[in-house]
Image (cartoon, rainbow, N blue to C red):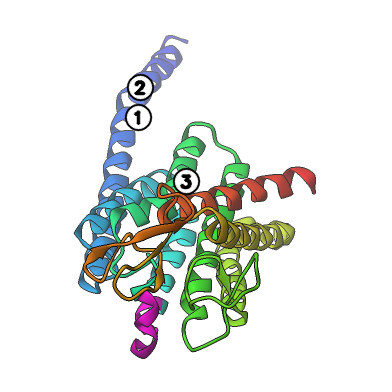
Amino acid sequence: MFQEGNDIYTKLVFFFIVTPFVIIKFSISNFLLTTILSSVISILSYNFKFLNFRGTVAIFLLAMVIFGLGGWKWTIPILVFFVLSSLISKLKRKNLAIAEKYIEKSTPRNHIQVFANGGIGGILVILNYFFPSELFYIVFVSSIAAVCADTWSTEIGTFKQAVTVNILSFKEVQQGISGGVSFPGTIGGVLGASIIAASSLLWLGLKHINYVIFIIFAGMIGNLFDSILGASLQAKYKCNVCSKITERSFHCGQNSLLIKGFKIINNDVVNFATAAIGGLFGFLFIQIF
């Protein structure tokens, strides 16, 4: 009996002494892996000129949060968005880069653009870490699907010359300008939302294929909201030199004249709102259906 009591005592002591070291070792290993992955993504992004220096720092911090707290399940969707969107942007034919002169989006991206697209995702990962719920993951992927749909709409929509119209007035507008829609851009948006939804399938599983469909629709609604907001409230300027309508407050070496929308609502604000709307509709679809 005494011997048995000693064995139990020994096991308890062993457990409480060894367990903290195991946890610390695991945490250090996880931290090192997270740091390595974040560093690789950052260095490649900077070398390929996907991001400027501040954007590189921002993607490093965002990657540390998402991979460190969420692992591959949460990292893959935003990694797919970032890598494929950057490659599509780089592959765009140079003779159509004229759109870059008028729209606010440009490469390399900066830190504000990184957080505008992925900031909500980072917040959701933190919330899920403290209050685990599969619902947070659905909202997260829906948010990324929305910003990917928006980005691919712009990039694919300006791959070649195409008729672009204002989503509210249906009047023809400058290709690539916010609020403008085209057939190639719409197809690009659907593809963007679909590829992000598909990237979550490994964790959601085929039994939850309806969730994947919800994510695609949420992404497209976010993209639609982006166009409506871009056509109505986003700041538009007129260049005092070339007289072109632009999203840039500084154009042709001079300050541009605000002719529509609100100065505070720029492309980054719209992108952040797009991510929020995509996530919101992902949440609503799950709750309703």
Q: Amino acid at mark 1?
A: Thr
Residue at 43% x, 45% y is 122
Q: Are marks 1 and 2 in contact (CB under 8 Å)?
A: yes
The image position of residue 208, as x and y in percent, is 71, 57
Q: Earlier in the sequence, mark 3 or mark 1?
A: 1
Q: Which residue is mark 3?
A: 120
Secondary structure mainly formed by the magenta segment: helix
Disc 2: which residue: 16
Residue at point 22%, 55% (across, down): 54
Residue sitting nearer the eye, 257 or 280: 257
Task: Name the mark nearer the viewer: 3 or 2.
Answer: 3
SS of the residue at dot 2? helix
Q: Residue furthest right?
A: 289
How far apart in space, not on screen, are marks 1 and 2 (Cα)? 6 Å
Label 3 or label 2, whichever comes before in sequence order: 2
The vertical placement of 285 against 155, above or below, is: above
Residue drawn where x is 34% and y is 75% of the image: 101
- The segment highlighted magenta reads 89-100
Residue visible at 43% across and 73% down in the picture:
84
Residue carrying label 1: 19
- Do residues under tags 3 and 2 come within 8 Å of each other at their CB atoms? no
How crowded pointer 1 is (Cα within 10 Å; few <14, some 14-19, many 20+) is rated as few
Say which amino acid is labelled 3. Answer: Ile
